[in-house]
Amino acid sequence: MPETAESYQLVWAVLLLLTFAMLLSVNSTQKKRKKLSKDIRRKKSALAKRPVEDIVQELKLEIGVIESKTANGRPVYARLKEELVNKEEQLKYINVGLFPPTYRFDDSQALKDRIAGCLDRQYQVIKSGRATSAYTNWDWFGSESKGARMVTSYQSLLLKAFNAEFDMIRKKMRHSSYETALNKLDRLELQLEKLGETANVAIAYEYFDLKAEELTIWHSELLRKEKIKQEKKKQQALLREQAKLAKRSLDDIDDLEDEIYYKNSDLVKAQKLAKELHGASSQDMEQKIAHMKEEIEKLETKFERATSQAQLTKAGYIYVISNIGSFGEGVVKIGMTRRLEPMDRVNELGDASVPFKFDVHALTFVDDAPRIERELHREFDGRRVNGENRRKEFFKVSPPEVAKVMRELRIDCDWYYEVEAKEYRESQLIREARKQEAEEAQSASSQFPQSI
């Protein structure tokens, strides 16, 4: 019996728990129902004030604005992402005491590649702790760890001072002062070694050799530019001589052309007169006519020689230029000029007839400019922008493609694949700023009530 009583009590307890749970569930369901009913009434009231079509239309407009902003933002995002990668690469060097080099507009791509390789090796040496040497075990008030941190800080300061002074030496170096710059670098290393005597810290030989190598690379670029400068003087002298020769030849051609014309006129008159004469007079006239023909033949020979001489002026500059603001990416102009200053021709092409100035990818002096120009035009003939007018020298090719063909033609010159396109990019930024300003003004005006 007691077991039966306990069983009944357990059953009653379970029933009570189930009943309580059901009541809670019903109560929760009622609350949810009330909340849903309230939401339905609120939404019905809102729909009564504003139709669904208006809401859908507004949402579509918002989606259109967002899609437009997304489309405009994608190229900006890609450009910023690319710049971020470059900045992170520069920051990596700055954090270890290496300052990213600043290049001049006429520095060659080869120089940039060689300096980048040299800086990467320097970075690896600094990162591994081999750039400076420290022959001491300091302790700071009995703490070896604090002493080690002090030595590390001393090494970092010494390295940054060395790199900063190196940049000053490098920027002041000229093509004729390489030995002076190298001596300055040696003295700098000795001065810093004396300053580091307290902590027994100095610039390591391995790192010093890498900086000396970098100095040599910069000096080779200065020598290259000086060589180009001297060669340009010779090229200009040759072009001047060609121009004089061509002018003399053209003057001779004009004089000979006039003389041949008058001689032929006299010959025609003599031939007409010979038909009217008889006997000895006719024979004398025939001899005169034969003599006149001989003189005309001599003049024609001189005329041909002068014409050939005028055509010998073949030296000139080959240029490869682009204008992404005017013609888009992947379009270059390949041409030639005999101007003493070839950039005058490039600037002339970028005058008021096009919206933006041209950027130069290559500009090199060759002995036979017309032939090289023809070879390049023939190579890219199927990729002309204007297929009808062959005097238009624009081609849908990239600068590296033209560089490859010029190397095959054994023409060595400096190439600049990355272009500044300053005017075009600044115009883009101005347009984007104005567009954003207009959108913000439109957004602000839409928030005001239609009537007050």
Image (cartoon, rainbow, N blue to C red):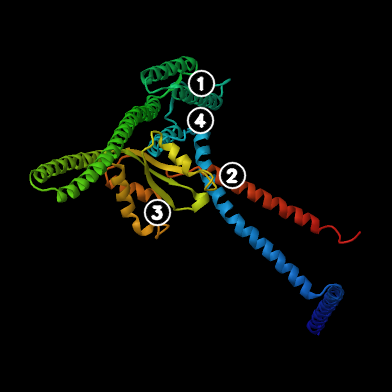
Quarter occupied by residue 263:
top left
Disc nearest the viewer among 4 and 2 = 2
Circle number at residue 382: none
Which of 216 and 212 lies nearest the eye of the viewer?
Answer: 216
Determine the CA span between mark 1 and mark 3.
63 Å
Distance of label 4 from label 2 (alpha carbons): 33 Å
The residue type indicated by label 4 comes to Gly
Q: Residue at x 68, y 65 (%)?
A: 63
Total number of numbered discs in the rendering: 4
- Tell me, yes or no, if residue 238 can be seen here: yes
Determine whether, in the image, residue 236 is placed left or right of residue 89. left
Residue contact between numbered discs 2 and 3, judged by CB atoms under 8 Å: no
Q: CA distance from mark 2 to mark 1?
A: 56 Å
170 vs 297: above or below: above
Residue 342 location, x and y as percent? 40, 37
Which comes before the other along the chain, label 4 or label 3? 4
Q: Which mark is residue 97?
A: 4
According to the image, label 3 marks what residue? 397
Give residue 58's quadrant in the image: bottom right
Marked residue nearer the N-terminal end (1 or 3): 1
* Point 52% across, 47% down: residue: 353
Residue found farthest to the right: 452
Locate residue 299 relative to residue 68 in the image: left or right.
left
Q: Secondary structure at mark 1?
A: loop
Distance (Cα) linking label 2 and label 3: 25 Å
C-beta proximity under 8 Å, tags 1 and 3: no
Q: CA distance from mark 4 to mark 3?
A: 41 Å
Residue 376 lies, with reference to residue 346, above or below; the image says below
Mark 2 highlights which residue?
A: 426
**Would you say 270 lies left or right of 68 here?**
left
Quick one: SS at disc 3? loop
